[in-house]
Image (spheres, grey):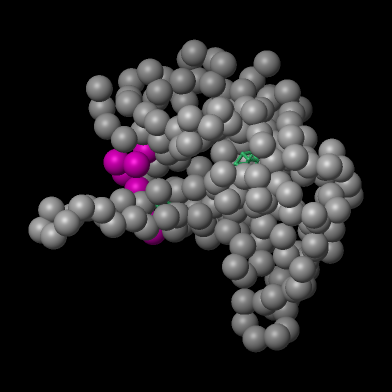
């Protein structure tokens, strides 16, 4: 079975946030909600300073704390590693948001709009009442991944079945694919480069791998 992961090449990210915009467009998230966020981090002391851009979001953990604390079984893990939320079962208690070490979850109780107090035509057309007052987060564009089998396409290779952020990146930072396949794009990247995972010490087995230097 596949285990879908994402790789993030920190050497290439310029912090333009095209990935954030692409995610918001693909998933119709409201203002203030960024399933794919890019952190802007300054480090060091003048004159030896450095600025780093770090795309973050749900890590689709192999052992997800959000799922373990969910009292309604709304949060689930698929056989291919994607962690999802059944909006019909979610009771909006927020336990998962507290348990997530990556601050990847959102709960929105009130509709907000990009401009003023009325929705744009697009916001009205794409409003999903099922997402109000329940937990939500990055899905790794599971709706696209789910089309792969029937269309005979490969996630991470064919754009139609690849997450929107990955398709949009202007700098080739993001890659998506099957960690279990040694010949996949992501497995090859990880074999050729040094990488780390965030808060790996917590035992969450996060599914986002950060490439930071060559061997
Ligand atoms: S990053 Fe957070 S929301 Fe995503 S699977 Fe891990 S614990 Fe759950
Ligand atoms: S689009 Fe690519 S380069 Fe730009 S912020 Fe996102 S990951 Fe970084």
Residue reaching furthest bottom? 116
State the image coordinates of residue 130 (x, y, percent, origin top left).
84, 58
State the image coordinates of residue 84 (x, y, percent, origin top left).
73, 40
Numbered marks: total: 0
Does residue 40 belong to the magenta stretch?
A: no
Foreground: 19 or 43? 43
Q: Residue at x 84, y 63 (%)?
A: 129
State the image coordinates of residue 96 (x, y, percent, origin top left).
71, 47
Q: Is residue 76 above or below residue 53?
A: above
Q: Is residue 162 above or below residue 154?
A: below
Q: Residue at x 56, y 28 (%)?
A: 203
Q: Is residue 10 above or below residue 3?
A: below
Write down the region rendered in magenta.
9-16
Does residue 13 belong to the magenta stretch?
A: yes
Q: Residue at x 55, y 46 (%)?
A: 102
Residue reaching furthest top? 182
Q: Is residue 214 above or below residue 84?
A: above
């Amino acid at each position: 079975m596949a285990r879908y992961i994402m790789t993030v090449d920190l050497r290439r990210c310029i912090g333009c946030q095209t990935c954030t915009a692409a995610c918001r467009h693909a998933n119709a998230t409201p203002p203030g909600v960024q399933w794919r966020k890019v952190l802007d981090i300054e480090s060091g002391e003048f004159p030896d300073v450095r600025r780093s851009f770090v795309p973050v979001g749900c890590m689709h953990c192999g052992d997800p704390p959000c799922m373990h604390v969910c009292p309604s079984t709304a949060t689930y893990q698929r056989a291919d590693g994607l962690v999802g939320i059944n909006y019909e079962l979610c009771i909006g208690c927020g336990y998962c948001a507290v348990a997530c070490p990556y601050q990847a979850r959102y709960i929105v109780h009130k509709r907000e709009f990009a401009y003023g107090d009325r929705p744009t035509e697009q916001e009205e057309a794409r409003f999903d009442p099922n997402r109000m007052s329940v937990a939500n987060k990055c899905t790794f564009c599971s709706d696209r991944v789910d089309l792969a089998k029937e269309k005979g396409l490969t996630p991470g290779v064919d754009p139609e079945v690849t997450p929107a952020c990955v398709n949009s990146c202007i700098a080739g930072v993001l890659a998506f694919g099957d960690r279990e396949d040694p010949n996949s794009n992501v497995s090859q990247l990880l074999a050729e480069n040094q990488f780390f995972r965030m808060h790996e010490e917590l035992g969450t087995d996060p599914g986002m791998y950060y490439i930071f230097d060559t061997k």
